[in-house]
Image (cartoon, coloured by chain):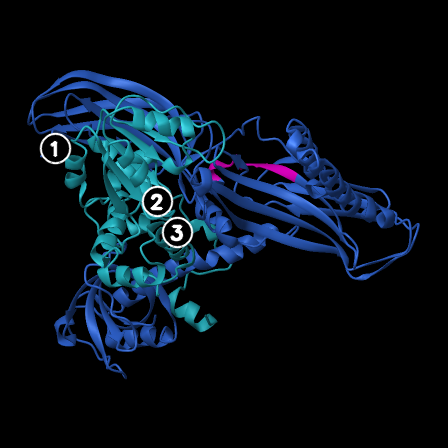
Amino acid sequence: MATCNLKIDLDEPKQIRLGGETITGTVIVDCQQDTNCKGLEISTAWSTHGRGNLDHGLGELVVAYQGAWHAGQEYRYPFKLKVAPWPPTYYGTYINVSHCVVARAKLAWKTDPRVEKEFPVMATTTPDDLQPVRQPKAGGAKVIIYVLLAIFGLAFGLAFIWLIPFLLIIAGLVWFFKFFLPKQLTGSVKCDVEPKRLQAGEKLKAHLSFTPKRSVKVNGVSYTVSCVEKCVSGSGSNRTTHTHELLKQTEALIGEGLLPAGQLQSFDVAFQIPRHAAPSMKLSDNEITWSVVFRIDIPRWPDWTETITLVVTPTADRHGVERHGADRHGAAIGGKVAPDNSMETVSSDLQTRSDEDEWFDQVLKQLEDSRDRERLQLVLGAIREHEFTLSLSIGEEMDREEFGESTYRPDVHGRWLSAYDERRDLDVALFVPDALELPQPESVWRGRIGIVDYSEDELTLFAKMLG
Amino acid sequence: MTDDLRRIIRPQYSPECPAGMWMSFESPFASWNLRRNPFGELSREERGELAVVERIEDWLKVLEGSMSALQFVGDCGFGKTTHLLALLRHLPAASYVYYPEAGTPPPLPRARPVLIDEAQRMGRRQEIQLIRHAGPVVLGTHVDFTSRLQRAGFEVTTVNVESPKTSETLTRILNRRIEASRLSDDQSLPLIAPALAAKLLQRFGSNVRNIEHFLYDCFQRSVAEHAPWPPAI
């Protein structure tokens, strides 16, 4: 038996806190045995979770109590703590950031009971170490610096001095192909993005201009806006970098064609960062990076490229986030961005997922409200071809009759399972055709179903598993 | 979805209806009664806490001898570090040393017991320090140290972490991670059935890390794209 159980009650748990704001609530200690508490620590903290190594940080920590607790008593400790200003709550694919209130009771000679409760946080400031960066010609300069550093290092080991000419040749080739050759055709290229630090929802303006030295055939001139999650898991030889592209939108400025020598090519474009876009983030082993890559694609010739890293700060509109919070998650999963009307594109893509839940809820309400069989058949007829995705807790296999009255007669052989949708508090009679794998009892199954009937008496939905 | 259908089912629907009206700022894992993807990376402490180490009592007994050496041998991903971290929880006086791939190797503490992770990366100096001092040692290593340790008078017990796991063991390993990510006590969890564990073993062998990576991606797809769960294999 645990010495004591801890519970956290947050005031307004669903409210989105701004970074640096305070959060209030109460830690409740339900004491089972007499014990001496060496310190009841209550803190706000954030941590990452996902594919990468964990990063974490502390908001504020207080010791709310030290002393004796007696069996059978309940103790309540109100708290008011500052929320860490950065990073914001984020749910992505490889990276997630959660903020929690953590309560831990330090007990002598016993395991310390610990409990935590998550709450959403949005940031209003972005750390200064997140700076926009210009990486000329796709990082070619960096390569040369590394090569030169390697030469310098090797110069100290005379045994490897014979390597130096080879390394110099490699550095020269990199410079020749990455810098010299493209410039021979494109001439000097100017490109820029403004602003390089902008808020989600704001528009950035990009400019690219060059005057070809010679008439040059191009496959195209384009720019790509991308947002990438990058994290590192493991350490040493087990260290692995994982990347996931949240957004990648390439827009052609011009297509395939011939650019005449001496004629100025100038492009000005605008791109709207989605309002609920993932913010730039740089933690120890987890980061989210926004960048714009300009490219002049020259056939049978090294391409000219330049990458500019942006800093996207979170939107400061708390209410907007509250209304559209799930958009952010969706955007992080693969919404597409289009210049100028990107927000609309993202929204419509993302609506579909939440739309499906909402759609199912509406269907269910209509089924529940169908007071007569005729109305019920009308609704069932309307949704006959429709598929829904549900998460169901699987119960035991049962005979069809045990679920109550239904006119549904399956056209294939199969088995009936009792199932339960916990989110909606809904009993489901699930028909599983023999062709599909039967879910295990007491497991949670998620998949597609079709609605085949509804029993008003038993308040049970009859569904057919589709896969 | 036809307009007729909209009228029947959702009379209040209108194109102006803001998308966000049914959105909330909630964890996508909450609908699974989880606070995170259970197959993601864990902190070192939690890895030790969640380790399923079936013979830990036997190994603790082995380590009672003053010249005892216990080595976990195997390739990446089979649980060497997990075994070491699980033992560390039962040996509060022990020190844990990890040898990185590059850089100066950290010194080996004189105090025993000592748990050495990636022991094959120890330098000559550390190896000498290891055998010079008496006291139980535990190694996580890619190479077998038996002969070197035996020459120094150690009684060596070797555990091959690559030996096949049963579907029951894998089920326990995976479900323990799911349990540790639980949000609420009174709701069920998307637990792994032994039949699925058997299929995972068939596909990935006993490499638990590869299995966890695979399940991480499957679970993420389920959360984000409503892909079926458990995944079809």
Hey, which quadrant is residue A358 in on the image? Answer: bottom left
Farthest residue, direction bottom: A411
Kind of residue indicated by mark 1: Ala
* Residue at screen point 39% across, 51% down: B213
Instruction: Answer above or below: position of A231 versus A249.
Output: above
| Crowd tier of the residue under label 2, counting other residues whose Cα lies within 10 Å: few below 14, some 14–19, many 20 or above | many
Residue under circle 2? B36
- The chain letter for the residue carrying disc 1 is A
Instruction: Answer above or below: position of B92 versus A302.
Output: above
C-alpha gap between disc 2 and disc 1 = 25 Å
* Residue at screen point 16% across, 75% down: A400
Farthest residue, direction top: A67
Percent position (x, y) of residue B112?
A: 25, 25
Q: Is residue A355 magenta?
A: no
The quadrant of the rendering that contains the N terminus of chain B is bottom left
* Residue at screen point 17% across, 36% down: B62
* Residue at screen point 14% across, 71% down: A398
Give me the chain that's cyan: B
Observer-side mark, 1 or 3, equals: 3
Kind of residue indicated by mark 3: His
Residue under circle 3? B213
Residue under circle 1? A2
**Which range is magenta?**
A309-319
